[in-house]
Amino acid sequence: MRNWRMVGVIVLLASVLAAGCAARSAPSQATDSGAWEISPEEAPAAEASYGGGEYSDYDINYGSMERLIVREASLDLVVPDTETAASEITSMAETLDGYVISSNMYRYDEGIRASITLRVPAENLDEALERLHELATEVRSENVSGQDVTEEYVDLQSRLRHLEATEERLLVFLDEAEDTEAALAVYQQLQGVQAEMEQVKGRITYLEQSVAMSSITANLTPDKMAQPLQVAGWRPEGTLRDALQTLVRVMQFLVDALIVIVIVVIPVLLAIAVPIVAIILVIRAIVRHRRARKAATAQQPGA
């Protein structure tokens, strides 16, 4: 009977844990390195109380703590030479304690385009953007965005503490189990809790790295490819634009004509043609009738 009571307590404990953790879900994003810590004083969270199988959270004042912001940037740059600029960007990332995640070169007859993604410490993001501006002859577009993950981070810490407290309690139950059935039930619950703990720890690390290291994507286009094609004052893109405009006007005229024909001309023609056809059919019928009478009269004897 004691074992069944223990199993019942385990099931109740797992149910409360699942209900509590289900209320704490968060979106997912990834980064590669860095660290960020929040002390318990900065991130007050729940303490578990298992006397009644429930836990409660203290109120968390998110506004009073340091905000955790994930910052990202993307730029489209025109540079004198793509390969040289790519090399300088790699060196710049290393100088700012960052690194290049990916670098792709695309070769065309007219030149080389490139796309480079790098990470730099968040405190160096503005300096990195300034250096990228210095490399470019033109900045065609630039976008810097930020995502506040403070609330999610604090909630994950609270959730992790609940899971750790649950793990400790399940380990006590496991030690107290007197037979294989009870031990197996405890062990299954313990595995589920530990798996969820790993997921939460992974997400926390994820956010720490995202906050610590900002991502920058730079798309590079050489000057030669950025300039409009022009031969001896002739600009083919202008001719192409004029040709497209002419094509659009012609197509517009044809579509308008078709609409007029379908909506106006065909009904009018039908309205005129129906009576005319009816008159022609009546006349042909009268003519045939007269011819038939004449033929019949000609065949009578003595006519």
Image (cartoon, rainbow, N blue to C red):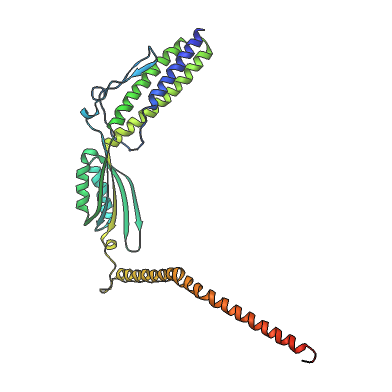
User: Percent position (x, y) of residue 58?
Assistant: 28, 20
User: Percent position (x, y) of residue 197?
Assistant: 39, 25
Hey, which residue is sitting farthest bottom in the picture? 302
In the rendered view, would you say 286 is above or below 248? below
Hey, which residue is sitting farthest top in the picture? 1
In the rendered view, would you say 108 is above or below 166? below
In the rendered view, would you say 230 is above or below 119? below
Residue at 38% in and 14% down: 50
User: Percent position (x, y) of residue 84?
Assistant: 26, 54
Residue at 74% in and 85% down: 296
Residue 143 makes an appearance in the image: yes
Asked if residue 192 lies left or right of residue 139, the reply is: right
User: Percent position (x, y) of residue 128?
Assistant: 22, 45
Residue 98 makes an appearance in the image: no
Residue at 37% in and 17% down: 54
In the rendered view, would you say 173 is above or below 256? above
Hey, which residue is sitting farthest right in the picture? 301
Quarter of the C terminus within the rendering: bottom right
Front position in the image: 289 or 280: 289
Asked if residue 282 lies left or right of residue 149, the reply is: right
Front position in the image: 119 or 198: 198
Residue at 52% in and 10% down: 179
Residue 59: which quarter of the image?
Answer: top left
Residue 242: which quarter of the image?
Answer: bottom left
**Total residue callouts:** 0
